[in-house]
Amino acid sequence: ASNGDKRDLPTGMGYKSCFMVVEGVSQKTVLDIFLQGKAKKYTYNDGLAIVGKADIQENTVLVSSVYKKQIYIIGDTVSQFFYDTERFLEKCKELPRVYVYMTHRVSETHGFALVENGELIRFFCYDEEDIRNIGKPLPEEIALEYQLPYDFEDVRNKEEYTMVDEEVIVELAIRQVGIDVKQYTYKDVKVGEMIV
């Protein structure tokens, strides 16, 4: 949990995962936009297991039910947002707010983004080949005292810039979309192929 309060991320979100949080719409809307309605109903844990075993080429994702106006989408396919951003933004036009997160400690690939009505508000992606840092720091970044790098020269300047790892992304996600996970309803989810 973060800062002594009860907020955290639901099981399966956070470390070594890719997930989106869509705010302010129904599960049906999310399914229609990203899965085009082709999804099967599972228990939460069974859905997570299917996503965990899926090959990345299968584009399998779990879509949660609505909880406190949020829908969580988890699956490796979500990472494509950071590499095919324009196509994702087109799909997000009908969505008031979308947060996207990616952490992968093996390849040290980390990222987050905020999209409002299809417009990219904030985007950060760090991998072994490139750093893309677009938009002004968000209030949660400022509160966490993050100074995210713009290039690899900044990465070498450890005194001034935040060294990006999974913890940086997870802490930010907890501040932005964290919930009281003991109250979270791990109910039925839909699992299907994400169309991007």
Image (spheres, rainbow, N blue to C red):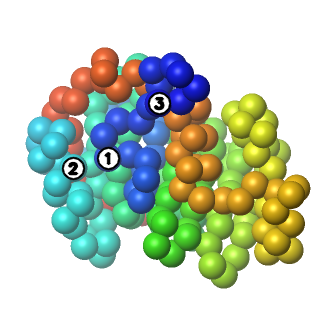
| Helix, strand or loop at mark 2 | helix
Q: Nearer the viewer, residue 86 or 154?
A: 154
Q: Nearer the viewer, residue 177 or 94?
A: 177
- Residue mark closest to the camera, 1 vs 3: 3
The residue that disc 1 covers is: 12
Rendered residue at 82%/45% (across/down): 136
x and y, in percent, of residue 10 in the image: 35, 36
The residue that disc 2 covers is: 48
| Helix, strand or loop at mark 1 | loop
Rendered residue at 82%/57% (across/down): 161
Rendered residue at 45%/20% (across/down): 6
Image quadrant where residue 128 sits: bottom right
C-alpha separation, residue under disc 2 versus residue under disc 1: 7 Å
C-alpha separation, residue under disc 2 versus residue under disc 3: 21 Å
Mark number displayed over residue 90: none
x and y, in percent, of residue 140 in the image: 69, 34
x and y, in percent, of residue 96 in the image: 56, 33
Is 116 on the left-hand or right-hand side of 74?
right
Q: Are marks 2 and 1 in contact (CB under 8 Å)?
A: yes
Give the vertical position of 48 relative to 165 (above or below): above
Q: Are marks 2 and 3 in contact (CB under 8 Å)?
A: no
What amino acid does circle 2 point to?
A: Leu
- Residue mark closest to the camera, 2 vs 3: 3
What amino acid does circle 3 point to?
A: Ala
x and y, in percent, of residue 79 in the image: 47, 63
The residue that disc 3 covers is: 1
Give the vertical position of 65 relative to 31 (above or below): above
N-terminal of the pair, mark 2 or mark 1, is: 1
